[in-house]
Image: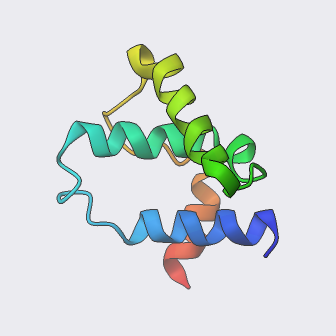
């Protein structure tokens, strides 16, 4: 599966989430961390927990400045297109 396919499926999954259910600020912070670092996270393999370790390192590095205000999908045109399909 290509990186763009994975990204599209990931964003479609996020769009499918009920934003009201995501009331826990930690859920929103975690999703924003994944979105903001998606291009760096996906190429990392999962063997030996490499991807999980990378995500853990990102959490520690960015914990003070992660946003929980709203899910940050940077390309709103793509989001609109996916919602229509």
Q: Quadrant of the N terminus?
A: bottom right
Q: Quadrant of the C terminus?
A: bottom right
Q: Taking 21 as reference, is 83 above or below it?
A: below
Q: Residue at x 78, y 52 (%)?
A: 43
Of the pair 83 and 54, the residue shown nearer to us: 54
Of the pair 17 and 6, the residue shown nearer to us: 6
Q: Taking 61 as reference, is 48 above or below it?
A: below
Q: Along the horizontal axis of the image, is 61 left or right of 65? A: right
Q: Residue at x 78, y 63 (%)?
A: 3
Q: Taking 10 as reference, is 27 above or below it?
A: above
Q: Along the horizontal axis of the image, is 5 left or right of 84? A: right
Q: Along the horizontal axis of the image, is 27 left or right of 4? A: left
Of the pair 71 and 46, the residue shown nearer to us: 46
Colour scheme in use:
rainbow
Q: Position of residue 12 (x, y in %)?
A: 52, 71
Q: Residue at x 39, y 14 (%)?
A: 64
Q: Position of residue 19 (x, y in %)?
A: 26, 57
Residue sticking out furthest to the top: 64
Q: How many marks?
A: 0
Residue sticking out furthest to the bottom: 85
Q: Along the horizontal axis of the image, is 20 left or right of 38? A: left
Residue sticking out furthest to the right: 2
Q: Taking 33 as reference, is 81 above or below it?
A: below
Q: Quadrant of residue 5?
A: bottom right
Q: Position of residue 4 (x, y in %)?
A: 77, 65
Q: Position of residue 55 (x, y in %)?
A: 55, 38
């Amino acid at each position: 599966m290509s990186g763009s396919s994975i990204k599209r499926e990931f964003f479609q999954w996020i769009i499918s989430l009920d934003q009201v259910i995501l009331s826990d600020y930690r859920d929103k912070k975690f999703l924003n961390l994944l979105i903001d670092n998606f291009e760096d996270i996906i190429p990392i393999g999962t063997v030996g927990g490499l991807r999980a370790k990378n995500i853990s390192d990102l959490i520690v590095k960015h914990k003070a400045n992660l946003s929980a205000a709203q899910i940050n999908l940077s390309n709103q045109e793509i989001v609109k297109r996916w919602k229509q399909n």
